[in-house]
Image (spheres, rainbow, N blue to C red):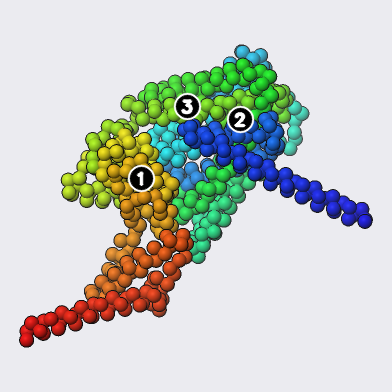
């Protein structure tokens, strides 16, 4: 055999071995992660802690079942970009402008004051030089966007005053990464890299990159979405959503800037798009998977040996980090005029170290400001501090809803007990509530949008703040005594998994829900609800009947068409539910040319109407005779 053949065979064998190893590692990671996430979910501690423990257990510093934690961490940081992209989708640029004081006021104060205090403590207590202390203290001021934002977003609190302040601080922290990289580069003891751009150039590059993303979003991505919308192909929305996230992140990464910031700007530019909800629903699963992988990788890079060598030091540093950050932020928020409960809640929520600290510690080591062992030590401190977050979030949640918190958002516990609970007091829920009030039915109104609660208050309507999908919130609202629980919120994520526990927890209440379309109607099948209404079905029938009137179609013919349409839709929906396929029952609709099954239903209705008419005429003739 020739040398070329031997080389090709060896390369194929190496490739096959690498593939086998990757598949095995993937199976181990997912299996252990599933086990620990289920355990920690069961204990009420959240999925993040489960991922971290699973990663530490199977990683190279644990049982050694999986290696390459650093490479997996670099890949999984795309999950943070997806997270910021989804947050950007919910933020209109005008709303971001409204938050400018919180971002550049409270956010700036938190990063600068906390970073300098931590740097001073490291300099005084651990004996580092002031340059090294600054290179370590500033990154420790950052918090974990990947932990805090999903919690706020999933619970609907990201739009509350509390959530907006947390988001503003986290956003400024992301913006602060570029200046921190510049500071570390300026303090570097390593030989100067002539190819490295100066700090002022990086700042200008950041501004220019953001402007480029804004223009691309407006003049490229939005027109592309309109083109995709014409074809209605769902997979194209997935492709465009992934393209927007990955392209913006890759563009920023090529400029040595924050990939998460680029993804956030890309999402914000699509916040006005009519296809925003479609993109959000398509990108969300990727975000969940990649964030889970990110926390697995964070656990994997935790050097257990460093912790085992000096456990008291590492634990003391992690505890000290949490205490100092919580105390400083609490005082700062209080100085900005917020109640103590809000201030302490934010302090606890953002008291952990952040994922970007790993990147900055590595840069500090490359700049010869700290030894690699010190970088590993503080990476372990950040990881341990992140493990405290699920516990501290519980306290922060209680403080957020405690008496004296801002914006006068009352907890449903303070609501008079009613026979009905309406969740979501927007345009849909308002009509439902009015009909209940018309028959003197007592109603408790719950919404998780502070702006909607404030607007309702101007019209003398009391709406209570809370996430109506949470069983504890419903219990505080009196769901155990209620006869009806009605979900009227515009939330396409509601499915059988969300509703079934509620139906089971409150067996005396009948659960009704608003759904967005047929897909969501299929998604809630089996939840045990007694009824659901598609939000535009009745209004579209009403408008269709009005259109037929304008065409001077006979009133009885319009009635026949409406009855046939309702019958066909009900039969088609039954097929779709029984088969679990949205494409089932294709013939049960009116199409150009009539449609075979639809035409037969309409003809049968006409024949019944004609037969009834003949029967009435014969009865009248007999009576006359």
Query: Of the residues tagged 1 and 3, which is closer to the observer?
Result: 1
Q: What residue lies at 17% left-to-right and 45% top-to-bottom?
A: 440
235 left or right of 132 in image: left
Q: Which residue is mark 1?
A: 503
In the depicted structure, whether residue 221 falls above or below residue 330: below
Looking at this rendering, what residue extends furthest in the right direction?
2
Q: What residue lies at 43% left-to-right and 46% top-to-bottom?
A: 497
**Which is nearer the eye, 177 or 183?**
177
In the depicted structure, whether residue 511 falls above or below residue 331: below
In terms of sequence position, does the residue under pointer 3 or pointer 2 come before the other? Answer: 2
How far across and how far down the image is residue 231, in percent?
50, 65
Q: Are marks 1 and 3 in contact (CB under 8 Å)?
A: no
SS category of the residue bearing label 3: helix
How far across and how far down the image is residue 286, in percent?
56, 47
Q: Which residue is mark 2?
A: 357
Q: Which mark is residue 292?
A: none
SS category of the residue bearing label 1: helix
Q: Which residue is mark 3?
A: 392
Between marks 3 and 2, how big is the CA–CA gap? 20 Å
In terms of sequence position, does the residue under pointer 1 or pointer 3 come before the other? Answer: 3
């Amino acid at each position: 055999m020739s040398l070329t053949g031997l080389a090709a065979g060896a390369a194929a064998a190496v490739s096959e071995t690498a593939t086998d190893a990757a598949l095995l590692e993937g199976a181990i990671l997912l299996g252990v992660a599933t086990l620990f996430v289920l355990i920690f979910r069961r204990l009420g501690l959240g999925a993040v802690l489960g991922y971290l423990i699973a990663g530490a257990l199977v990683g190279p510093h644990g049982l050694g079942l999986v290696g390459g934690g650093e490479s997996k961490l670099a890949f999984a940081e795309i999950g943070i970009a997806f997270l910021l992209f989804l947050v950007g989708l919910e933020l209109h640029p005008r709303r971001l402008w409204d938050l400018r004081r919180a971002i550049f006021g409270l956010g700036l104060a938190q990063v600068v004051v906390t970073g300098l205090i931590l740097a001073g403590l490291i300099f005084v207590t651990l004996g580092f030089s002031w340059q090294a202390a600054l290179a370590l203290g500033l990154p420790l001021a950052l918090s974990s966007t990947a932990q805090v934002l999903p919690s706020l977003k999933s619970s609907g609190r990201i739009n509350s005053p509390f959530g907006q302040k947390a988001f503003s601080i986290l956003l400024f922290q992301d913006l602060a990464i570029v200046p921190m990289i510049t500071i570390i580069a300026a303090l570097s003891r390593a030989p100067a890299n002539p190819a490295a751009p100066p700090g002022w150039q990086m700042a200008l590059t950041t501004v220019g990159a953001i402007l480029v993303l804004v223009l691309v979003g407006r003049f490229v991505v939005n027109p592309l979405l309109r083109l995709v919308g014409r074809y209605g192909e769902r997979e194209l929305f997935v492709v465009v959503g992934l393209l927007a996230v990955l392209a913006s992140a890759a563009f920023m990464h090529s400029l040595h800037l924050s990939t998460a910031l680029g993804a956030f700007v890309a999402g914000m530019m699509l916040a006005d798009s009519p296809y925003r909800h479609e993109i959000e629903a398509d990108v969300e699963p990727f975000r969940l998977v990649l964030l889970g992988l990110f926390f697995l990788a964070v656990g994997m890079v935790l050097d257990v040996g460093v912790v085992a060598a000096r456990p008291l030091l590492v634990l003391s540093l992690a505890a000290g980090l949490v205490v100092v950050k919580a105390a400083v932020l609490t005082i700062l928020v209080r100085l900005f005029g917020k109640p103590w409960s809000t201030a302490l809640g934010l302090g606890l929520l953002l008291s952990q170290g952040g994922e970007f600290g790993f990147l900055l510690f590595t840069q500090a080591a490359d700049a010869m400001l700290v030894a690699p062992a010190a970088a590993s030590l503080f990476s372990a401190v950040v990881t341990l501090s992140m493990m405290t977050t699920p516990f501290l979030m519980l306290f922060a949640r209680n403080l957020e809803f405690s008496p004296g918190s801002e914006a006068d958002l009352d907890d449903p516990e303070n609501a008079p007990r009613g026979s009905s609970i309406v969740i979501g007091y927007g345009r849909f829920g308002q009509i439902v509530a009015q009909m209940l009030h018309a028959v003197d039915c007592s109603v408790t109104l719950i919404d998780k949008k502070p702006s909607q609660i404030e607007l309702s208050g101007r019209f003398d309507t009391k709406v209570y703040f809370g996430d109506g999908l949470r069983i504890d919130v419903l219990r505080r609202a009196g769901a155990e005594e209620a006869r009806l629980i009605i979900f009227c919120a515009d939330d396409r994520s509601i499915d059988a998994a969300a509703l079934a526990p509620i139906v089971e927890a409150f067996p005396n209440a009948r659960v009704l829900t608003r759904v967005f379309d047929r897909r969501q109607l299929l998604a809630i099948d089996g939840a045990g609800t007694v009824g659901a209404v598609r939000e535009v079905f009745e209004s579209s029938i009403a408008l269709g009947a009005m259109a037929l009137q304008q065409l001077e179609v006979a009133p009885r013919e319009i009635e026949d068409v409406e009855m046939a349409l309702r019958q066909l839709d009900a039969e088609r929906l039954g097929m779709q539910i029984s088969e679990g396929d949205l494409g089932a029952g294709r013939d049960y609709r009116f199409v150009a040319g009539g449609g075979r099954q639809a035409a037969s239903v309409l003809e049968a209705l006409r024949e019944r109407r004609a037969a009834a008419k003949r029967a009435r005429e014969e009865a009248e003739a007999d009576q006359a005779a």
